[in-house]
Image (cartoon, rainbow, N blue to C red):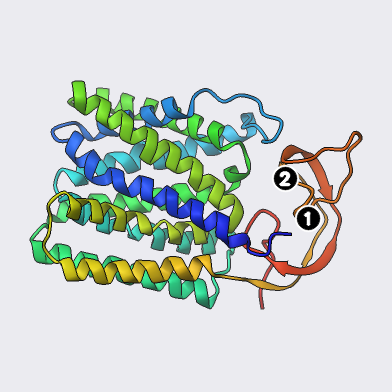
Amino acid sequence: MNRQPFLRGSALAVLSAALFGVTTPLVRHFGAGVGAFATGCLLYAGAALGAGPPRRRADEPSVGWPELPRVALVAAFGAALAPAALAWGLQRVGALTSSLLLNLEALFTVGLARALYGERIGRRAALAVSAMLAGGGVLALRAGQSGEFSALGLGAVIVATLFWALDNTLTRPLADFDPRAVVFWKATLGAALSALAALISADHWPRGGALLGLLACGMTGYGLSLRLYLTAQRAIGAARTGSLFAVGPFVGATLAFALGDRAGGALVLFSALLFSLGVYLHLSEAHRHRHAHETLEHEHAHRHDDGHHQHSHDPAVTGSHSHRHRHEATEHDHPHASDLHHHHEHH
């Protein structure tokens, strides 16, 4: 049994955040003069192209008709409204300030995961969230000193973070399905909704390099990033994945700094230390106690060497695979996170 269940999921969450964070200054650059809904459409069209049409896999459950209403809901919030709000805000607030404000997504996600799924955040994870939010606050102070401010632009970026936090928490039940299929259908529906809104609002569309740049940002910072995010959610839950995603704004701010914004270097360094502390606290977390599992029947990708899947196959099956299976009630003690099998209460 894996003695450190947080490590792989946390690493995937950090990589997902980095891919998303690095695209924020680039979206502002390529999206200059482009309509907000047109920008969102191209970003998620790129995500859909990068994912490609889903195929039936033996090691992952497929997204079916029962899941489509939830996919449509997360597409509306996360792939249509949120990117349009971010694109609109980016044109009125600098890339650095917008990158920093994206920290609020982590705060909203942690709160919603606690409210909707009852995910427990222990003292160590709470300290990690606090360190990351403090890092974002330090960067916001640095942005304020640079004079980048627009009330409407700031409000739009904050609304985008709230929509993405709703997307993150509503996506949690979809994390146990084929990530490629989830990304493809969410991105396709989101791009279609954004295209319709862009036509209604007569948005200006980019050409040439700007169009290709937005599609490339969508493939990496929205498509690949989302696949990694879903895989991380599967391992460590929505709250911890959301808090680790706070690394993304720091990556965006660092890129803005590397592109020539040298003001406030000491504050950026101090913020980097706070974010590093938060990531370390997550990666070194070890949550362990004796806990009980109730009888459960469901389908998801699993292995038989993880300590939770003891059923037999004839002929024998090795490696990751997916089928409907039954868990008998049991009680044991091992390190665990808020994954599919660990939603128990804590006292």
Labels 1 and 2: the sequence-earlier one: 2
Report how many numbered discs are placed on residues in the image. Answer: 2
Res 115 seen here = yes
Q: Which of 271 and 126 is in front in this view?
A: 271
Q: Kindly identify which numbered label has been placed on residue 99.
A: none
Q: How crowded is mark 2: few (under 14 residues within 10 Å), some or many (20 or more)?
A: some
Residue 117 location (% of width, % of height): 58, 59
Left or right: where does residue 263 sit relative to residue 246?
left
Residue annotated with mark 1: 308
Taking 115 as reference, is 78 above or below it?
Answer: above
Left or right: where does residue 13 sit relative to residue 85?
right
Q: Which of 315 and 123 is in front in this view?
A: 315
Left or right: where does residue 98 sit relative to residue 178?
left
Residue 121 sits in which quadrant?
A: bottom right
Left or right: where does residue 139 sit relative to residue 302?
left
Q: At 16% from the left edge and 66% from the top edge, which residue is drawn?
A: 265
Residue 98 location (% of width, % of height): 23, 53
Spatial CA distance of label 1 from label 2 is 9 Å
- Tag 2: residue type? His
Q: Kindly identify which numbered label has been placed on residue 302.
A: 2
Question: Tag 2, which secondary structure?
Answer: strand
Taking 33 as reference, is 111 above or below it?
Answer: below
Res 154 seen here = no
Taking 277 as reference, is 164 above or below it?
Answer: above
Residue 286 location (% of width, % of height): 61, 71
Q: At 16% from the left edge and 62% from the top edge, which residue is drawn?
A: 143
- Tag 1: residue type? His
Residue 289 sits in which quadrant?
A: bottom right
Residue 128 sits in which quadrant?
A: bottom left
Residue 227 location (% of width, % of height): 50, 40
User: Are the residues tagged 1 and 2 within 8 Å (C-beta)?
Assistant: yes
